[in-house]
Image: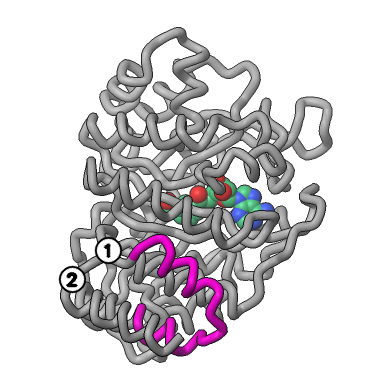
């Protein structure tokens, strides 16, 4: 075990990358602090003391979805109580309020709606851009892009070009879950495959848009599936350089239907964030999404290789429908205090990681 840590430390110092076997050995190691120290060192070399956050707002325009992912408590069918689709005016009101509050980003995702035409999404982007040109629109995922291509009979490239033309600025990293087919069969049997997620994301990168990547962990996957997930992301990033941040999402179990789900404790969350930092040497940013982690683990994660806390969020449904106990929103002051009390330097960024203000 001591040799494993020495080998990895030497690799990090020389700029070499760790192997899949070494990543798996880290997952299997009980030495949380040892792993954290390696991750903190890897992050310090890349990002110094800075921790990024942004002023953003989530808008989930619909929770209607043709898929039935067993981990998802947010998506509903047309017959279900609580299903909704926001009218364009409501979306514009939320966007306008975000802009007035100083936000720089809208994060817009939703279910795969059974009836809305592709034009709805184009009009939504164009209307938000016309009303609030100061807001960067980070929207949809590879899952939605594939769905729009099916809806319209157009190629993925055409769909991306039209969304970009209408105002799409970048894409969040959702829908990745765990790439391994054996796991997807249990948690999202109707969703596009892991291979398709990677293929569509590659096309998004080739079209000049940045994206993030996520990994949903703590359900039925094994460590080997997490390593496989990280490996596929590292290979794609080698080809495109289009990923900005990697975001491990801690599974929230309430109102979900994943038989035998393991759940995520603090140790597993910190270990997963840290190993992601060590393994993904070609990702600049590792984000602790406080909504799913809770504020205290997200703050402690800053000592485990993390350099981004996401943003103000304002209205969050996906995690909270599944029992997340974090607040709905954080202010800039609260984010800065979390970061400062961890001994780090808060830096407000825009979606593309341009630094706006250091605190
Ligand atoms: O794709 C769904 C996950 C994702 C649950 O890119 C769940 O900046 C935990 O992708 N427990 C959506 N997670 C959220 C997402 C995201 C969030 C913040 C920032 C960014 C970014 C991306 O949430 C889904 C799915 O993987 N999810 N249900 C659940 N029960």
Query: Magenta includes 197?
Result: no
Q: Are marks 2 and 1 in contact (CB under 8 Å)?
A: yes
Neighbor class of circle 1 (other Cα within 10 Å; few <14, some 14-19, many 20+) is: many
Closer-to-camera residue (84/146): 146
173 w.r.t. 307: above or below: above
Residue at horizontal 28 percent and vertical 28 percent from the top: 164
Q: Is mark 1 within 8 Å of ligand 1?
A: no
Residue at 54 percent across and 65 percent down: it is: 329
Q: Position of residue 185 (x, y in %)?
A: 68, 37
Q: Which residue is mark 2?
A: 15
SS category of the residue bearing label 2: loop
Please state if 218 lies on the left or on the right of 35 as rendered. Answer: right
Q: Secondary structure at mark 1?
A: loop
Q: Nearer the viewer, mark 2 or mark 1?
A: 2
Which quadrant of the view contains residue 39? bottom left
Specify start and end residues of the magenta stretch as a single range. Answer: 19-39
Q: How many numbered marks have been drawn onto this rendered protein structure?
A: 2
């Amino acid at each position: 075990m001591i040799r494993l840590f020495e080998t990895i430390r030497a690799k990090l110092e020389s700029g070499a990358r760790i192997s899949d076997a070494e990543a798996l050995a880290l997952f299997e190691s009980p030495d949380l602090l040892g792993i954290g120290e390696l991750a903190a060192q890897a992050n310090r070399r890349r990002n110094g003391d800075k921790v990024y956050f942004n002023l953003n707002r989530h808008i989930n325009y619909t929770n209607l979805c043709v898929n039935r992912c067993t981990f998802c408590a947010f998506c509903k069918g047309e017959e279900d109580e609580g299903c909704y689709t926001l009218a364009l005016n409501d979306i514009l009101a939320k966007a306008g309020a975000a802009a007035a509050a100083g936000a720089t980003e809208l994060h817009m995702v939703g279910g795969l709606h059974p009836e809305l035409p592709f034009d709805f999404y184009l009009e939504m982007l164009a209307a938000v851009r016309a009303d609030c040109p100061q807001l960067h629109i980070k929207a949809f995922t590879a899952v939605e892009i594939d769905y729009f291509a099916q809806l319209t009979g157009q190629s993925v490239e055409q769909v991306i070009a039209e969304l970009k033309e209408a105002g799409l600025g970048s894409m969040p990293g959702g829908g990745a879950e765990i790439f391994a087919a054996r796991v997807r069969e249990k948690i999202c049997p109707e969703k596009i495959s892991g291979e398709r997620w990677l293929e569509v994301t590659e096309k998004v990168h080739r079209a000049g848009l940045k994206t993030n990547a996520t990994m949903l962990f703590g359900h039925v996957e094994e460590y080997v599936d997490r390593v496989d997930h990280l490996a596929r992301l590292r290979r794609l990033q080698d080809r495109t350089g289009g990923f900005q941040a990697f975001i491990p999402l801690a599974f929230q179990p309430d109102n979900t239907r994943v038989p035998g789900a393991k759940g995520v404790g603090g140790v597993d969350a910190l270990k997963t964030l840290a190993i992601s930092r060590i393994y993904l040497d070609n990702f600049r940013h590792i984000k602790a999404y406080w909504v799913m982690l809770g504020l205290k683990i997200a703050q402690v994660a800053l000592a485990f290789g993390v350099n981004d806390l996401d943003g103000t969020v304002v209205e969050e449904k996906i995690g909270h429908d599944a029992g997340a106990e974090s607040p709905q929103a954080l202010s800039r002051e609260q984010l800065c205090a979390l970061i400062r009390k961890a001994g780090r330097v808060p830096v407000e960024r825009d979606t593309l990681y341009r630094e706006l203000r250091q605190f």
